[in-house]
Image: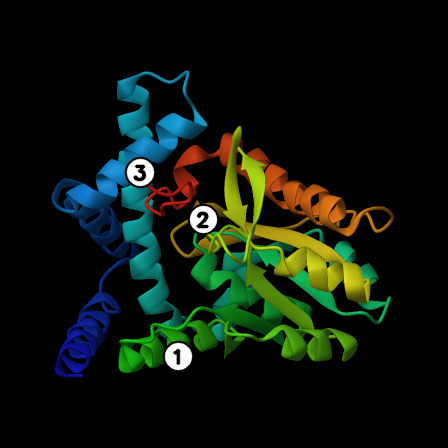
Amino acid sequence: MFVDFFLIFIVKSFQQILRILPENIQQATGVFFGRIAFLLIKKRRKVAISNIKRAFPSLDNAEVMAIAKRCFEKLGINFIESILMPYLPKEEYKERFTLEGRTYADDALKMNKGIMALLFHYGNWEIMGVASFVLQREIIALARPLKRHKYINNFLNKLRHSTGLTIIANENTGRDVIRYLKENRIVAVLGDQREKRSRGVYVEFFGEKVPTSKGIVTICMKTGTPIIPAYPVREGFLRYKIICCEPLEMERKGNINELIHKNTRKINAFLESIIVKNPDEWFWVHRRWGRM
């Protein structure tokens, strides 16, 4: 508990210093933090390098290292942006954040089956809640809680709430999610987290099968809810274009296990397509493939 309070105090104090600095200094601070993390957090640097090599085996070591370093730098920027979000005036949202593909969301809501917004650890996923201000609709986001750090978890959720999200703990929430979708609400869930082997389905991701959550497609196959992938494109410091994509087509006829595999593979394939465009924007420090 003491450690949690101390860390929160440090971050809050840092927020007050950052908010009075020019924007270019704020961004440079994020890059600096990312570079320091790249040098000091050897374990995560090793994971990132290993992951990039698995996804892009044709790259040489210099190219892999460059992607890993830029990834850390952008994670540093993400951190700075996220802790500054509560102080960003709402009247600036229109000039800083745009939404492309809104018609996909509007058309989906007309079906009256809700929307499963499929997000990823891509770009600065923590600011995706700003879409709620553009859509003028509440977005309910599932987030895995930090069980051993209750106060830090609450602090993070307050930051997420400042972007426009309503946060619920992602723990046995299937029934709640179905209820929200029946109420024609938007539920956002991260689709690239490593699932427990006993609960997931093994689906190809960059040529290797990895345990992937089957909850997203299972719920949407059952309810008929459209799955709409969305991701942010970085256009500057605290400036993003949020891309809303065409709903992923869910197959519903055939063997249930085969359908779950096929439909889940579509999620991984979509993620591959955006990672290839901008490899340094993804969260390579996560053990998506497990241990070597």
Above/below status of 165 relative to 291: below
Which numbered dot is residue 158? Answer: 1
The reply to whether dot 1 and dot 3 touch (C-beta < 8 Å) is no
User: Of callouts 1 and 3, which one flags the residue occurring earlier in the amino acid sequence?
Assistant: 3
For the image, the number of numbered tags is: 3
Closer to the camera in the image, 92 or 124: 124
> Residue sitting at 32 percent across and 45 percent down?
285
Q: CA distance from mark 1 to mark 2?
A: 20 Å
Crowding around mark 3 (Cα neighbors within 10 Å: few <14, some 14 to 19, many 20+) is: many
Whether pointer 3 and pointer 2 mark residues with C-beta atoms closer than 8 Å, the reply is: no
Name the image quarter holding the C terminus: top left
Spatial separation of the CA atoms under disc 1 and disc 3: 29 Å
Residue 230, above or below 129: above
Name the kind of residue labelled 1 in the image: Lys
- For the point 81% across and 69% down, the residue is 113
Give the amino acid at mark 3.
Ala
Query: Disc 2 on helix, strand or loop?
Result: loop
* CA–CA distance in space, label 3 to label 2: 16 Å
Residue type at mark 2?
A: Gly
Answer with mark 3 or mark 2, whichever residue precedes in sequence.
Answer: 3
